[in-house]
Image (spheres, helix red, strand yellow):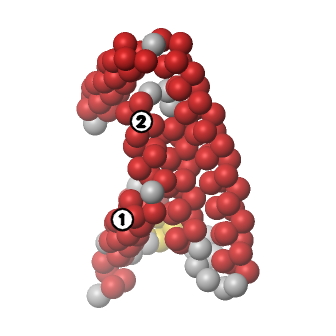
């Protein structure tokens, strides 16, 4: 897993550098730097706006008695979009811009909601679940917590 991430990081950085050099060749080096700085500033603004907006919408949902699931997912997607725009590079900025489009966000929100629900239903919502199987009850005795599957049966 670590090796795959490392290879992806190296290939992604090389692709970003290649595209930046091609853009610099077409429009000039100084203009390319200005565009990358502008994208970074826009990404920082999106991160700030997404974070503050997500917090406000989450509290509003909680005050109305609704689950803030979609608000939190939208906030996370907005943060990811801003982060991708903030990272210097044209490929990451293109993905960040895609994350800002409402149809793409709706598709990603639906996919995330489905995957999280599937993990919760399977009892794998936390990566730390199997490590913490022993529970100390109120009498001070250690007992084994049943798995999610045995609870559902």
Horizontal side of 2 relative to 143 (left or right) equals: left
Instruction: Estimate the x, y position of residue 86 in percent, counting from the top left.
Output: 55, 34
Q: Is residue 117 above or below residue 102?
A: below
Residue depicted at x 28% and y 36%:
1
Q: CA distance from mark 2 to mark 1?
A: 19 Å
Is residue 49 visible to us here?
yes
Q: Nearer the viewer, residue 114 or 147?
A: 114
Whole-percent x and y of residue 20? 39, 20
The picture places residue 10, in percent across and down from the top left corner, at: 32, 22
How many neighbours does mark 2 have within 10 angstroms: few (below 14), some (14-19), or many (20 or more)?
some
Q: Position of residue 32 (x, y in %)?
A: 49, 19
Mark 1 Cα shell of 10 Å, populated few (<14), some (14-19), many (≥20): few
How many numbered circles does the render carry? 2
Q: Decide: marks 2, 1 in contact (CB < 8 A)?
A: no
- Please name the residue shown 59% across and 30% down the image: 38
Front one among 2 and 92: 92
Q: Quadrant of residue 89?
A: top left
In the picture provided, is 115 more to the left or to the right than 102?
Answer: left
From this viewpoint, is residue 2 visible? Answer: no
Q: Secondary structure at mark 1?
A: helix
Residue 10 drawn above or below residue 77: above
Work out whether 24 lies above or below 136: above
Label for residue 92? 2
Q: Quadrant of the C terminus?
A: bottom left
Element assignment for label 2: helix
Q: Which mark is residue 31?
A: none
Counting residues from the N terminus, which is met first, the one under dot 2 or under dot 1? 2
Q: Residue shown at 34%/23% (left/top)?
A: 19
Q: Residue at x 58, y 39 (%)?
A: 43
Nearer the observer, 33 or 73: 33
Q: Which residue is identified by label 1?
A: 107
């Amino acid at each position: 897993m670590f090796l795959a991430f490392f290879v992806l990081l190296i290939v992604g950085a090389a692709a970003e550098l290649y595209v930046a050099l091609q853009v610099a060749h077409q429009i000039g080096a100084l203009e390319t730097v200005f565009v990358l700085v502008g994208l970074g500033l826009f990404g920082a603004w999106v991160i700030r706006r997404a974070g503050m907006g997500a917090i406000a919408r989450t509290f509003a949902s909680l005050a109305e008695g609704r689950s803030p699931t979609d608000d939190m997912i939208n906030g996370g997607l907005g943060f990811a979009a801003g982060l991708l725009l903030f990272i210097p590079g044209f490929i990451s900025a293109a993905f960040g811009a895609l994350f800002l489009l409402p149809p793409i966000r709706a598709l990603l929100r639906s996919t995330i909601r489905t995957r999280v629900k599937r993990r919760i239903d399977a009892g794998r919502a936390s990566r730390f679940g199997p490590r913490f199987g022993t529970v100390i009850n109120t009498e001070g005795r250690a007992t084994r917590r049943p798995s999610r599957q045995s609870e559902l049966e």
